[in-house]
């Protein structure tokens, strides 16, 4: 039941992340030129000790760093967190709102097993798109901008991003269990 409820949202999440990544890969050559022109600003940032600014400008210098910023910061952390909040807040609270929680609890299955099953489906729904989009970037980077990416390094980065997104899903699932309405769970998780 949970998979049927979440599949459309998962598909939309996957398509949004892919739509964010494609133009980012295609813009790499132009942004690399801009990054080269910003080298004097990077030197000034070193003098001013602005670590964050130096890191962001420095990410424009090497393609794997740039790809990680685009795929995992913008795509995974931002879209993944939003998807985790949207999916997690409704896992239990939606059952209460639609008054189907009693039906679920009347089955000869423990409440913890029901929660585990719902959480497992949601965890797959929020992490699978991260891996699929990250892995799609490996051949896309080679085809579009002729820059190689390591499949293993991309997988490790996707795993780190997935752990972050699952932690947000855990928080929002807890809010879904505690609060009766999905809107209240979303407000608390937000």
Image (tube, rainbow, N blue to C red):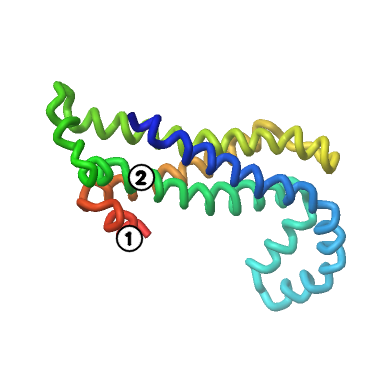
Helix, strand or loop status at disc 2: helix
Image-based side of 22 in relation to 34, left or right: left
Instruction: Assess disc 2: are there few (<14), some (14-19) or many (≥20) residues with their C-alpha within 10 Å of its C-alpha.
Output: many
Vertical side of 145 occupied by 58: above or below: below
Residue at 72% x, 56% y is 59
Residue at 79% x, 53% y is 27
Comes first in the chain, label 1 or label 2: 2
The percent position of residue 129, horizontal first and vertical second, equals 55, 37
Instruction: Assess disc 1: are there few (<14), some (14-19) or many (≥20) residues with their C-alpha within 10 Å of its C-alpha.
Output: few
Residue at 64% x, 42% y is 18
The percent position of residue 50, horizontal first and vertical second, equals 66, 72
Task: Report the disc number at residue 34.
Answer: none
Image-based side of 75 in relation to 149, left or right: left
Residue at 29% x, 32% y is 116
Between residue 167 and residue 16, name the one nearer to us: 16
Task: Report the disc number at residue 88.
Answer: 2
- CA distance for labels 1 and 2: 12 Å
Between residue 107 and residue 56, name the one nearer to us: 107
The residue sitting at the front extreme is: 98
Helix, strand or loop status at disc 1: helix
The percent position of residue 172, horizontal first and vertical second, equals 33, 49
Quarter of the figure with residue 42:
bottom right
Check disc 1 and report the residue beneath it.
187
Between residue 146 and residue 91, name the one nearer to us: 91
Count how many numbered circles sit on residues in the image: 2
Quarter of the figure with residue 131:
top right
Query: Do callouts 1 and 2 mark residues in contact (Cβ within 8 Å)?
Result: no
Quarter of the image that includes the C terminus:
bottom left
Image-based side of 43 in relation to 77, left or right: right
Quarter of the image that includes the N terminus:
top left
The percent position of residue 125, horizontal first and vertical second, equals 46, 35
């Amino acid at each position: 039941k949970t998979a049927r409820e979440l599949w459309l949202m998962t598909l939309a999440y996957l398509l949004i992340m892919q739509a964010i990544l494609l133009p980012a890969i295609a813009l790499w050559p132009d942004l690399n030129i801009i990054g080269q022109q910003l080298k004097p600003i990077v030197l000034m940032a070193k003098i001013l000790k602005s670590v964050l600014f130096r890191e962001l400008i420095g990410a424009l210098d090497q393609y794997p760093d740039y790809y990680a910023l685009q795929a995992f910061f913008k795509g995974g952390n931002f879209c993944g967190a939003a998807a985790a909040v949207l999916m997690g807040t409704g896992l239990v609270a939606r059952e209460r709102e639609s008054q189907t929680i009693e039906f679920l609890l009347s089955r000869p299955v423990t409440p913890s097993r029901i929660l585990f099953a719902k959480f497992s489906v949601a965890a797959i729904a929020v992490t699978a798109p991260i891996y699929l989009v990250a892995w799609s970037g490996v051949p896309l980077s080679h085809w579009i901008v002729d820059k190689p990416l390591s499949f293993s390094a991309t997988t490790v980065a996707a795993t780190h991003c997935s752990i972050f997104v699952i932690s947000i899903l855990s928080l929002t699932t807890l809010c879904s269990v505690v609060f009766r309405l999905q809107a209240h769970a979303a407000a608390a998780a937000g």
